[in-house]
Image (cartoon, rainbow, N blue to C red):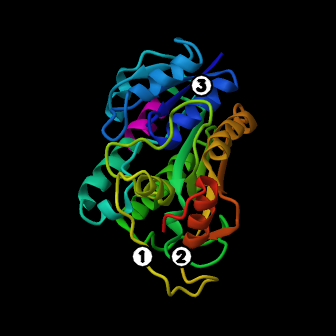
Amino acid sequence: MKQILVTGGCGYIGSHTTCSLIENNIKPIVLDNNINSYEWIIDNIKEFYTKDSCIFIKNNCEYIKNINYYVDGIIHFAAYKSVGESSRRGLDYYINNIGSLLNILQFIDKYRIQNFIFSSSCTVYGDVGGVVDENKTIVDGSSVYGQTKIICEKIITDFYNQNKDLNCVILRYFNPIGANIKIPIGEYCKKTPESLMSRLLNYVSGRDDFVLHGDDYNTIDGSAIRDYVDINDLSYAHVYCLKKYMNSGGVFKIYNVGTGKGISVKQLISTLEKVIEKKTF
């Protein structure tokens, strides 16, 4: 059985990808310090599958040099990811997001690991309107968080150019939404979530307030438009890339992961109200 190291595997996208790996007969080795996630996520995954369906190591990416498991590849999620917080804690974001990547690449270089998938973001495109493709020139990430992703992508590109036998895929996510319907592993984080759907659900359940920011955009209803991708589709994208490019002898690919179709905030609110059959906004 193939074994894949998943950094940040207790997080929202990481935990769903862990499940997708298990369901495709790949064993995840999850490395997560749980600074913004919960260890019980792994407990729920093991309870649904089997106790030995995955391995959990509670630590940060610097610990990777002490791992004694053979791995066929690495999926690197572990990073600070709040756009708003990054404007207040910029230095922390640069140290953590870039430092963790360097630890991973050192491990790859030392043990000649052949398969690597990096979790990037559509924030690398900055504030743009309309559909963007992977060939767009990256200029400004519009936030410190976005800048860390741009820098990480540049480092990975340079690393690949010196290690052409590496199978490397960068996935630029748009806005993940939803949850695994079989296992309770939705977007559970210790800090207040910033994703729109989680904020809406917190509001309708009485756990938090919700304020609609902006109703005069040049859109169909005046509210902001975003591309939302189902978390289960997004998680499988990582498995698909592993299957497609593992043992390819050296590839470098960048993919956007989204639908290419925008949904406005008000449209999302309207859909939620239909599903819960309650007018709440």
Percent coordinates x, y for residue 168 in the rendering: 61, 43
User: Within 10 angstroms of label 2, few (less than 14), some, or many (20 or more) residues?
Assistant: many
Q: Which residue lies at the image location 48% right of the left edge and 60% below the top edge?
A: 196
| Front-most of residues 193 and 58 | 193
Of labels 2 and 1, earlier in sequence is: 1
The amino acid pointed to by label 1 is: His
The answer for how far apart the CA atoms under marks 2 and 3 are is 41 Å
Outermost residue toward the front? 278
Q: Which residue is mark 2?
A: 224
Percent coordinates x, y for residue 75 in the rendering: 54, 37
The amino acid pointed to by label 2 is: Ala
Labelled disc at residue 72: 3
- Residue 68 magenta-drawn? no
Q: Which residue is mark 1?
A: 213
Q: Over which residues does the magenta segment extend?
A: 102-110
C-beta proximity under 8 Å, tags 2 and 1: yes
| Front-most of residues 176 and 126 | 176
User: Within 10 angstroms of label 3, few (less than 14), some, or many (20 or more) residues?
Assistant: some
